[in-house]
Amino acid sequence: MDTTALIFTAVMPIFLVIGSGFFARRVGWLNEEADRSMMSVVVNLLYPAFIFSYILGNDALRTPSNIVLPPLIGFTSIVAGFGVTMLLARRLKIGNQKECRTFAFTTGLYNYGYFPVPIIALLFDRETTGVLLVHNVGVEIAMWSLGVGFILSANDPKSAWRRIFSAPVISILIAVPLNLLRGDQYIPSFCLEAINLLGKCAIPIGLILIGATFADLAKGVRMLERIRIPITASLLRMGIFPVAFIFFAFLFPFSPELKQVIIVQAAMPCAVFPIVLARHFDGSPEVALKVVLGTTMVSLITIPIWISVGLKVLDL
């Protein structure tokens, strides 16, 4: 099987699981009342277990450059994305101030969790997955400290620091030094197996909830109205940004694991979480949904292409 076909094979299950969540909501198997408790379990239990399962015993994360550089690159890439998208949103007059801020926030934030994790797990090894998780600390910090500033209102009583230091971020901050000290050698095997079992549930359940969210929000949104919003977002996120990411990885002597992470992130559509944030804060859920749906549909075709190109350019 060639590289493009293998990547397509890695991508398709993601969309099928999202589709199953969409279907489950539409037929009434998964109601909205269950979302909050399920998401709480994913964020506070399953995803931290997933993080520990991929970081503990990870040799790549015993190299200092793979601990320091990934979060720095994650932070920088998001901040740069916010800057470019905000400038273009205003120049292109995407909408009013609220809509421009929502467009910039949503388009500037690539999917850094539920899409790249299964792709990297299939294409590469657990070392690269561990580097991805550490990289995502920088993404989380940029998203909450700067990104939410575009759509932030007084609706959320939590401080920025409380939002940044979520359960996944705290798990990474604990797991990385524990891995450096080889703490996994002192944890009973049955505990590690329990952690692995819980971790395996995180991504599928998260994708099902994403599908359910799409089912809720897609009802009243007409994608063909103001279609330049998803088209512009797709050109940026799925066309221009991947070239910049791959060129950036080509210029610098990063570790192979970090280059693999950059290549996969280059191909990612916009993250889904901004839809939730746009509803919770003073943003435009309609704009966020159009951006996310548009880039996600396009990514079904472009993800295999960009990852294949990146691997060839970087000779990985």
Image (cartoon, helix red, strand yellow):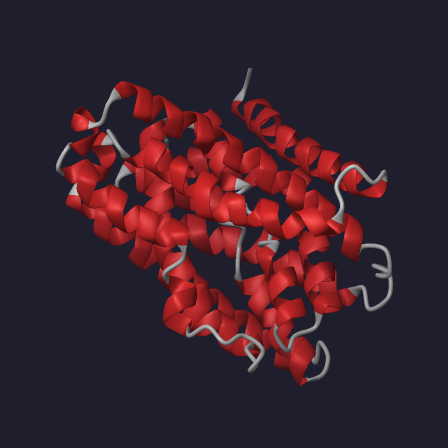
157 to 198, vertically: above or below: below
Q: Going 70% across and 31% down the picture, which residue do you hit?
A: 16
Nearer to me, 36 or 254: 36
Which quarter of the rendering shows the N terminus?
top right
Q: Is residue 162 left or right of residue 221?
A: left
Which quarter of the rendering shows the C terminus?
top left
Q: Is residue 222 left or right of residue 267?
A: right
Q: Residue furthest left?
A: 181
Q: Position of residue 266 (x, y in %)?
A: 49, 48
Q: Position of residue 134 (x, y in %)?
A: 32, 47
Q: Going 65% across and 61% down the picture, which residue do you hit?
A: 275
Residue 308 shows up from this direction: no
The quadrant where residue 153 appears: bottom right
Q: Position of residue 26 (x, y in %)?
A: 84, 42
Nearer to me, 110 or 208: 208
Nearer to me, 186 or 133: 186
The total of numbered circles placed on residues is 0
Residue 289 shows up from this direction: yes
The quadrant where residue 221 appears: bottom right
279 to 49, vertically: above or below: below
Q: Residue furthest top?
A: 1
Nearer to me, 2 or 296: 296
Q: Going 49% across and 52% down the picture, which residue do you hit?
A: 243
Q: Going 54% across and 42% down the picture, which residue do you hit?
A: 114
Q: Position of residue 255 (x, y in %)?
A: 26, 40
